[in-house]
Structures are given as structure tokens and as C-alpha cells.
Amino acid sequence: MKRFLNKLFLFTILYYDVLIILIFVMFIIFICGCVVNPMIEPAKNFVNTVGKEYIEYVDKDESLDENAKRARRINVEAFKMLIEKAGK
């Protein structure tokens, strides 16, 4: 019985330690998430100006094949979609 109580006590301590660590990690993630919001508008401006110029450059670059050009267009579009999603 004493061995069982010792194991139960250790399990309880570990359970609360994990719970405290989890709460701390969630708090840090919440704090970090708040920092991202001020970056949405500058990122949107960047992708709407530099992104367009970059796509023009990619379209004119003769050293890139169609697959490379498509990959770069997809990256810019994915970034635009991420910004739109974050801005909502």
C-alpha cells in the first residue's frame, strides 16, 4: 500500500508539473501571437508593391524555366493568402 501511495504521489507531482509547463507555454504562445498583428499591414503593403515587381521580374527572366517561374508565383500567392488570412 505504501508503494502504491508513493507512486500515486509521484504521478500527482508530475501531472501538476506538466500542467504548469503547459500553461506557461500557452501563455508564451499567446504573447507571441499578439506581436504578429502589427506586422500585417506592412506585410500587405510589401507584397502589393514589391511582390508585383518581383513577379514582373520573374516573368521577364529568361534564365528561369516555366517550373521555376510557376514556383515563384505560387510562393507570392501563398504569402498573399497568408496575409489576408491573418488580417481577418
Image (tube, rainbow, N blue to C red):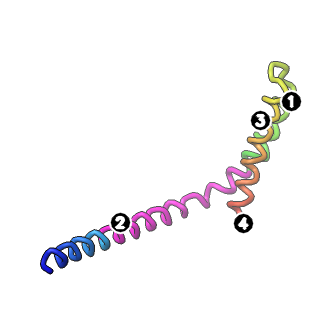
Task: Give the secondary structure at mark 3.
Answer: helix
- Residue under label 2: 21
Mark 3 sits on what residue? Answer: 71
Instruction: Name the residue carrying label 4.
Output: 88
CB-based contact (under 8 Å), mark 2 and mark 4: no
Label located before the other in sequence (2 or 3): 2
Mark 4 or 3, nearer chain start: 3
- Badge 4 marks a residue whose secondary structure is loop
Task: Return the disc, 4 or 1, that comes first in the chain's sequence.
Answer: 1
State the extent of the magenta-drawn residues as a range.
17-44
How far is mark 3 from mark 1, CA to CA?
A: 12 Å
Q: Amino acid at mark 4?
A: Lys
Amino acid at circle 3:
Ala
Quarter of the image where the N terminus is located: bottom left
Compute the Cα span from label 2 to label 3. Answer: 40 Å
Rendered location of residue 32, percent (x, y)? 50, 60
Residue drawn at x 73%, y 52% is 44
| Disc 4 + disc 1, Cβ < 8 Å | no
Q: Residue furthest top?
A: 63
Disc 2 and disc 4: Cα gap in Å?
31 Å
**Which residue sits at x=78%, y=29%?**
68
Point out the frontmost of discs 2 and 4: 2
Residue 21 magenta: yes
| Mark in front: 4 vs 3 | 3
**Quick check: 36 left or right of 56?**
left
Crowding at label 4, few (<14), some or many (≥20) Cα neighbours within 10 Å? few
Q: Amino acid at mark 2?
A: Ile
